[in-house]
Image (spheres, rainbow, N blue to C red):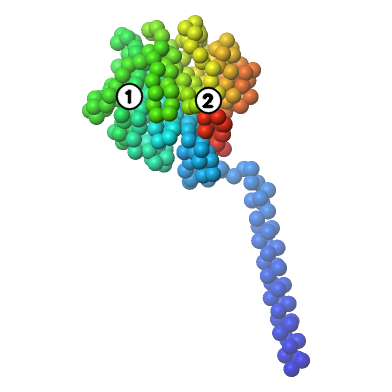
Amino acid sequence: MKRKKRKINLKSRKNLKYILSGLVITLFSLFPLLKNLDNLNWKNVFNNFEIPNQATSDDKDFNMSVHFMNVGKADCAYINCNNHSILIDAADKEPMGTVTEYLKKQGVSKLDLAVISHPHRDHIGQMSEVIQEFKIDKFIEPSIPEKFLPTTTTYEKMLKEISKKNISSKLVKGGESFNLGDMHIDIFGPLSPNENLNNNSIVMKITYKDVSFLFMGDAEKTEETEILSSGFNVKANVLKVGHHGSHTSSSQSFLEKVQPEYSIISVGPDKNNLPKEEVVKRISKVCKNIYRTDLNGNIVVSTNGKDIKVITEK
């Protein structure tokens, strides 16, 4: 009996030895992955899950979220506030399907309001597709003299889709305001006709309780000066920086009036190397929190009307 008991103990020790050896080998094999954790392609990881409309599942009182989509050197922002939704601009034409795919991941089936800041391709590129895919209650675009309007295929197709679906459409200019659910919307521009379409941009401020977002389109210094001269209250918590961080926009005098806590630059690789360093320096003088879609990916700013939280893709 003693011999048999001894044999079992030896076998148990042998099994334990194999188990410990396996654990050591596993740890060593994981070491390179852990060591290079910072180099993982988090974009691929991020793309496999959906950004919540609110900050997190625990932040149920953060009823407003603004999604600044990573669409390269173009603009596209989706806003949801207590089940009222807005889309401002719709990226460039490529890559096709980017905007509709993102909206569908957010569970969007209807837009209460669609906006084009101005009719340049990098702002209206996928709007026709959006109109085809989603029900849209109201559509607004800047009031621009016909002689300055583009005759591009992209713009003409968008107008045809609006007409085909019989969407209520309106031309707006600075000085108008309206409410959408719990959001108050002020239109600051355009104020006067300009042959430079950038200076015919819709500049709009969206306010939810004590928090406001200022969307600049591609407004340049000319339109910024007109807006300041008109006495509009441009102060805002979050600034969507004008014209992708180009040196033609974001004058120091304008930024000092806005005094943003957070600034978002929608930008991607291109020959102009945006945003310009001088513009980033100007923004840095008045704002500590600067986010860029080329560096941070999709950016979601959520608020309960008092506090603000930011979620970034990377």
Quarter of the figure that contains the C terminus: top right
Can residue 211 be seen from the camera position used here? Answer: yes
Q: Nearer the viewer, mark 1 or mark 2?
A: 2
* Residue at the spot 53% in from the left edge and 25% down from the top edge: 210
Instruction: In the rendered view, tell whether residue 149 sits above or below residue 79.
Output: above
Q: Residues within 10 Å of mark 2 (few under 14, many from 20)?
A: few
Q: Is residue 216 above or below residue 42?
A: above
Task: Indicate which disc, 1 or 2, sits on the residue closer to the N terminus.
Answer: 1
| Left or right: 131, with 122 as reference point | left
Label 1: element kind = strand
Instruction: State the count of labels.
Output: 2
**Which amino acid is tagged 2?**
Asp
- Relative image position of residue 161 (x, y in whole percent): 26, 27
Residue that label 1 marks: 139
Label 2 secondary element: loop
Give me the disc on residue 210: 2
Q: Is residue 95 visible?
A: no
Front residue of 175/122: it is 175
Give the answer, above or below, for where 165 lies relative to 29: above
Q: Amino acid at mark 1?
A: Phe
| CB contact under 8 Å: marks 1 and 2 | no
Q: Position of residue 233 (x, y in %)?
A: 51, 14
Residue at 54 percent across and 15 percent down: it is: 250
The picture places residue 271, in percent across and down from the top left corner, at 50, 22
Farthest residue, direction bottom: 1
Residue at 66% x, 50% y is 34
The structure residue drawn at horizontal position 69% and vertical position 72%, both measured from the top left corner, is: 18
Residue 224, given in percent of the width and then of the height, sits at 49, 11
Asked whether 183 or 94 is in front, the reply is 183
Judge left or right: residue 55 versus residue 136. Answer: right
